Image: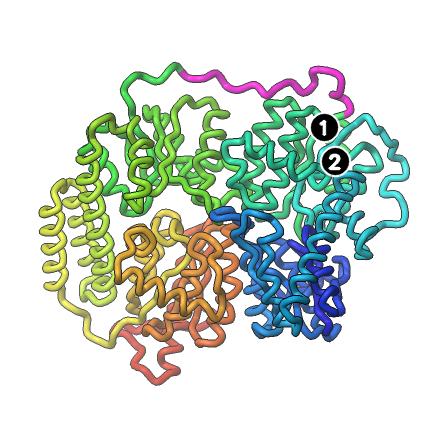
Amino acid sequence: MRVGIPRVLSAYYYLPLYKTFLEQMGCETLVSSPTGGKTLEGLVYCPTDEPCISVKLAFPHTVELLEKGIDRLFFPTLIGTVRNRFYCPKHIGVPAMLRNGLGLSEDFLISPPVAGRRRPEERFNSFLAAGRKLGAGSRECRRALKEAWKAQELFWQATVQQRMTSAEALEELFQVPLFRRRRRYNPLARQREELRVGVVGHSYILYDYIGHNVVERLQEQATVLVPEMVPQETIARTLGRLPYGEELWRFEQLIIGSAFHWLESGAVDCLVLVSPFECGPEAVMEVFLEEAANAAGIPLLVLTVDEQTGEAGVVTRLEAFLDTVKAGRGSRYFPQAERKPKRPAAPPERVIGFPTFGTLDLVLPGFFEQAGVKTVGPVSLSRRTLELGEELAPEFICHPFALTLGQMRQCLEAGANTLLMVGGKGRCRLGWYAEMQEILLKKAGYSFEMITLHSPLPLKKNWRSFLERLRPVIGPGKGPRLLADLYAAFLKAHYLDLGEELLFYWRAREKERGSADALYGEFCRRLKEARRPGTVRRLYAAFRESCARLERAPGPEPLRVRLVGEIYAVYEDFVNGNLAKALGSLEGIRIEVRKEITAMKWLRENLLRSPGGDWRHYRVKKAAAPYLKELVGGHGLESIGLAALASREGFDGVVHLWPFTCMPEIIAQNIMTRISRETDLPVLTVIVNEQSGSAGLQTRLESFAHVLQERRERKGEKGRCPVSWDWTWEA
C-alpha cells in the first residue's frame, strides 16, 4: 500500500516517527517533494486566502501526492500533550481542512488524534488504530510504533549531540532530501565562529522554501544555534522557571525554551525570529522574546515571511542586522533597554479598570458598585481606543487584543490603578492577553496591578481560588454577599440577551422603523440602574409588553440570517460596525438577524451546564461532526455546527464574523465553503480589523441581502417585501 506524507507542518518535527511507523508495517511511503516555485503555484487549491502560508502549503503538497496515485494519506491530528496543553489550532484543524477542501474520504485520510498523555511516546498510541485501518494486526502495530519511537529519539539525539539542524538530520539519517543550494549564498561572506546567532521559529518555516534558507545563509557568516540543538530536558527546566512556560502551545515551547536558555546562559550574541505572516502563537511569543532580549541586552530581529516575500528583502535585512551586531559586539552598543519613568506610586484606595464586552458594560459597573468597589468607566470603544491599543500591540495580534489593550490604557489614564482581565490557557490566544498586556503596558511606563480572573465554575472546585483572586478587590468577608451580587449580575445579563432577541425580532417586523430600537434603548437605560432581581424581571416584562403593542408591517415573513463567528466580533457592535442593526434596518428588504454566540449563552452551555444548553451544544457538535470533529479553539467548531444547522432551521443565509488572523475562525471559514456548497446556503464572510470601514460593509450587506432575496424567489417562496427595491448586479 502506498501511503503519502505531506512535507508540511508536523512532518518537520515527527517525520522519522511517521515514516518508520508506516514502513515497519510494510507500507511504501511517499513524502511530497520539497516546496518550490511550482508548489507556490498550487496554493490555489486552498479554498480561502486567509490561512498562514504553512497551512496553505498543505494543499499543493497533498495534491502532488494524489497525482502520484497514493492509496492513503497520513496526516495526524495534533491536539495536545497532556490535559489542557495544546498544539496550535492549525495542527488540530488542517486534516479537516484538507478533507473538506479536497473532497477526501475519511477512509482515505488517516489522521490519528495525538493528545492527552504524560509520557511523550504514549501520546501516539492512537497510531495503533491507524495501523489497523491500514491492514496490520495489533501485534504488528505495536512493534511498528516501538521502532518508530526509537527512530524519533535517534533523530532528536542527532540534532543535539551532533549539532545538526532538523533538515540535516532528516537528510542524513532518513534519506529525506530537502532543498539544498549547491553554491554559496554569499561568496564574499567571511565565517566568524565567534559570532553566535540564535535562530528561532517553526521548523516548517526555517527549513522550507518560504523561509529563504535563513539558517544556511547565516551559517556562512557565524555559528548558528537552532531550537532542536537544545536538549528536551534543558528546555523543560527553562520553561519550568517561567510563570507561563508549561502552558504554551507545544512547538512554541521549543522556541521559547531554547531562546530563554540561550539568553540566560549567554550562549548567543543576537536572536533572529522567523515568523509566517498571520501566525497567532508567534505574535504571543514575540512579546515575551522582546522583553527577555531587552532585559539581556541582546538584539532581536523579527523576520516575517509568506508567499509574497522577496528574497532580496530578506537578505538585505539580515545583512544590515548582522552588520549592526558585529559593530556592537564587545562594547555597550546594546545596553539594556531603558524604560520610561514610572508614575508615582498608586494611592491606597483601589480604583478598578476593565475592558468592556458587548452588553456586559451595563452589568459590571453595577456589580462592582454593590460590592463597594470604586471603578473607572466602563470606557466605550472608539477610534481613539483602537489607536491607543495599536500603538503598543504586536503587528499580527488579533483585533480584540488591541481594543482591550486600548481600553486598559484609557482606564489607567482616567485614574485606575488595578486592571481586571479574564484568563485561562487553551487553544485560543485569549488566555494570553493578560500576561502580554501587562508586559506591554508596564514597558510603556504605566504603574498598576493586573488581576487575572479564571472561571469560578464549577463552584465546588474553583470558587475558593476565584475568591482569593478577587479578595484584593472586594476586601475580606464578602464571599457570601458576592454570590448574591453575582446572581443579580447574571440575571441582568440574561435578560439583556432576551431583550436583544426581541429587538431583532421586532426590528424586522415593525411598521415604523426605529420603534423597537427606541424601546430597547429605554429598557437598557433602566436596567443599568436596577439592583434587585425582581426589578430586573419587571423591566423585561414591561419591555416585552411594549414590543407586543408595536404595529406590524404588512407582507411576507422577513428573511432570516444567522450570525456566527468569533464571540468578540459577533457580540461587540463597535467591532462589527453594528452589523446586526445595519442588516436588520435595510430599507427595502426585511431581515431578522439571530445570533446564538453571546457571553451568556456560552456561560449556560459551557459552565452552568443547563439541560437546554447541553442539548443545544450536543446538536451543534453533532451537526459539525461531518466536517470537523475536534475543538480548534474559540468558537471555530460552533461556527461550523451553527452554519450546518442554519438551512435545516429555516435560515436564508449566514454571516461569518471574525477578527483578522483568528486561527480557529480561519479553519472554520475554510471548511464553511463546503457547507455553503452542499446546503445551497449563502455565506458572507466579514473579517474585522483596524482597517474596517462602514461604507464598504454597508455595500456588502446590501448585495448579500439581494442574493438572499433572489434565492428565496428562485425557490418559489414569497420574497418581496412591501417596499420594492430594484436591484442590478452592476449597482
Decide if residue 555 is on the left or right side of residue 666.
left
Q: Residue 225 — which label? A: 2
Question: Residue at (65%, 66%) from the top-left corner?
Answer: 139
Q: Is residue 614 above or below residue 524?
A: below
Left or right: where 666 falls relative to 607: right
Q: Of residues 464 and 140, which is closer to you in this image?
A: 140
Q: Which mark is residue 511?
A: none
Quarter holding the C terminus is bottom left
Q: Quadrant of residue 604?
A: bottom left
**Which residue is identified by label 1?**
268
Viewport quadrant of the N terminus: bottom right
Q: Is residue 334 magenta?
A: yes
Name of the residue lying farthest toward the front: 139
The percent position of residue 617, horizontal first and vertical second, equals: 35, 62
Q: Which residues are magenta?
A: 326-343
267, above or below 187, in the image: above
